[in-house]
Amino acid sequence: MLSRSELQTMLDERVLVLDGAMGTELYEQGFGFDRAFDGLNLSDPHAVRRVHREYVDAGAGVITTNSFGANRLRLQRSRLDDKVAAINQAAVMLARTAAQARPPHNRPLVGASIGPLGQPLAPIGRLTAAQAREVFAEQITALLAANPDLFVLETFSDMAELVLCNEVVQQLAPGAAVMAFATFTDDGKTLFGHKPEEVARALLAGGAAAVGANCSTGPQALDAVLERLARVPGARLALSPNAGMPRLVDGRYVYVASPDYFADWATKMAEIGVRAIGGCCGTGPAHIARMAAAIGVRAPRMVIGEPRIEVREPQLEADESSPGEHQQSDFERKLASGQFVTSVELDPPRGVDCEKLVQGAVALRQAGVDAINIADSPLATARMCPLALAVLIRQQVEIEILLHVSCRDRNLLGLLSECMGAHALGIRHTLCVTGDPPSLGDYPGAKGVFEVDAIGLVNTLSRLNRGEDANGKRLNFQTDFRISCAVNPTAVDLPREIGRFHRKVEAGAQYALTQPLYDPADLERFMELARPTIPLLVGVLPLRNGRHAHFIHHEVPGMAIPEAVRTRMTQAGERGPDEGVAIAREFLTAVRPLVAGCYLMPPFNKFEMAIEVLKT
């Protein structure tokens, strides 16, 4: 293993030519992108070795191992997470074997590739820093056992994750040579909004030998990034762009930047002081061969020249297309002034006919209800889009809509799209929920997304309210979502539930709605332990009969009904619905002084029961 200073000395003596892409080369051999390319180290090592050998023959000075995604979290998708050590050690061995085809005095280095974990870190995602360290440590330990020459940390869009990965490398192999790459968007920042110079300073302070940019788009797009990286004194810079933007030709992805174009670009980069130059997606042995021939054995310039590109910070401008100012509703006025508010949940239909629900919303408003909650496919059952039902209701009745937004079915991009669309349609109130897993519903084979959880979604909407996207980049608009969250006072692990509740509040939740409760003591205990600082709407679900009560208690996750209530419902017989309303009314009377409002969930959309509960 080279030391940091040894790699820096090499970079001061000559421009180092890196290799090109591994994934797209394996794709060209017929392996689909649905495969775990890292697993080929064990299942088809000849294919991996063939790619390495072609880069060796092309003149690459660094052969990067096929271990970019060989961490436990990514390998879980292909059920290879029990083979982390074997896959990573095989990756180093295959690259080393290929490198030994050249004589010792001209033998390329073996760089152990480490990529991001494939899950966003908290607070956007659910992966904590401690969990990320553990996963990185497992992969790095396996790579170290095979003795690579350096580490290549590549294609990180989150500076925090890249810095964390570098820290773990330094802890397990103090002073080891690390070449660290971030990836940048068209505006010259990371996906999470960090400037190139911020990334470079943080990595160099953490012990990286060289820093730079890879992947992103084509060579030209990295000009502005390079100019900003060059602002960091003493930084040894490395670049490995994609071969332009891919296009789909006859069912296959093709990158259009030619080897000659890459050679011309690499020559210019070497002339202005870039120390290591290679390629990412779409670059192959032909690109590397032309680059190696063009660069030769030249020594790098010791400093990069004056900036050639003026970089301007984006300015926040008014968004002329933004909807008009939101008029405060009765629900909002009451909540702000401390008056008791009422909200009733309506589940979207399983089909396309929602006339009954729209008429139900009209009846609820006439009964004095302040807001309608629209659930997002509760219990993972396939239902109409809640936003569509919200719009249809608002066309008929002037009432506040509290839209449930579930993290189960959409990635972060889809969640942002859905929420911005809701805002444009006049929906302001959102209930951020993680969502029930698909295994509970009528399509148990469907796959949940869960890229972020409720805490991450609250954080994301709070950023939109500040005029930032989920990555902290400034936007030309601001939203004014009223963000709510869910909490379960009867959770089995109540301390954990309270901890998550406080994290939701810290992320920006403005009020909270509880799971259905039946015992005032449960709410009193929660209030005493959690001491909420935001308004709380207590959940009330009127029971239909004894079977309904037993089903909820024994079969619905996270819900509990006292034995006395279950007995009372069973004994009610045919009077079940009336008894359920009476129990709900008694409970609500008892807890009303403790909460800001109630959240009624009539079973099977029987909104008449909600109206009965609210009658005094």
Image (cartoon, rainbow, N blue to C red):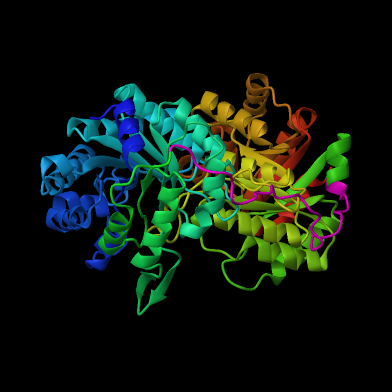
Relative placement, left or right, of 314 versus 256 is right
Query: Relative to 480, is 77 on the left or the right?
Result: left
Residue at the extreme top: 528
> Residue 376, relative to residue 234: is it above or below?
below
The region drawn magenta spans 302-331
Q: What residue appears at the point 51 percent right and 41 percent down from the top-left corner?
A: 125
Looking at the image, residue 123 lies above or below residue 465: above
**Residue with the most extreme bottom position:** 250
Please give left or right for residue 507 compared with residue 103 in the image.
right
**Count of marks overlaid on the render:** 0
Q: Does the magenta stretch include residue 499?
A: no
Q: Which residue is more in the foreground, 445 or 316? A: 316
Residue 374 as seen in the image, left or right of residue 12 = right
Q: Residue at x 47, y 54 (%)?
A: 216
Residue 214 visible (yes or no): no
> Eyeballing the image, is 163 above or below 34?
above
Q: Position of residue 499 (x, y in %)?
A: 57, 26
In percent of width and height, residue 347 lies at 63, 58
How far across and how far down the image is residue 65, in percent? 24, 46
> Would residue 315 be counted in the magenta stretch?
yes
Q: In which quarter of the image is the C terminus?
A: top right
State the image quarter where residue 538 is shown. Answer: top right
State the residue at coordinates (30%, 40%): 72
From the viewer's side, name the closer residue of 268 and 570: 268
Would you place residue 196 above or below residue 360 in this image?
above
Most common secondary structure along the magenta stretch = loop
| Residue 197: quadrant of the picture | top right
* Residue nearest the observer in this picture, 116 or 405: 116
Quadrant of the rendering where the N terminus is positioned: top left
Please provide percent x and percent y for residue 247: 43, 72
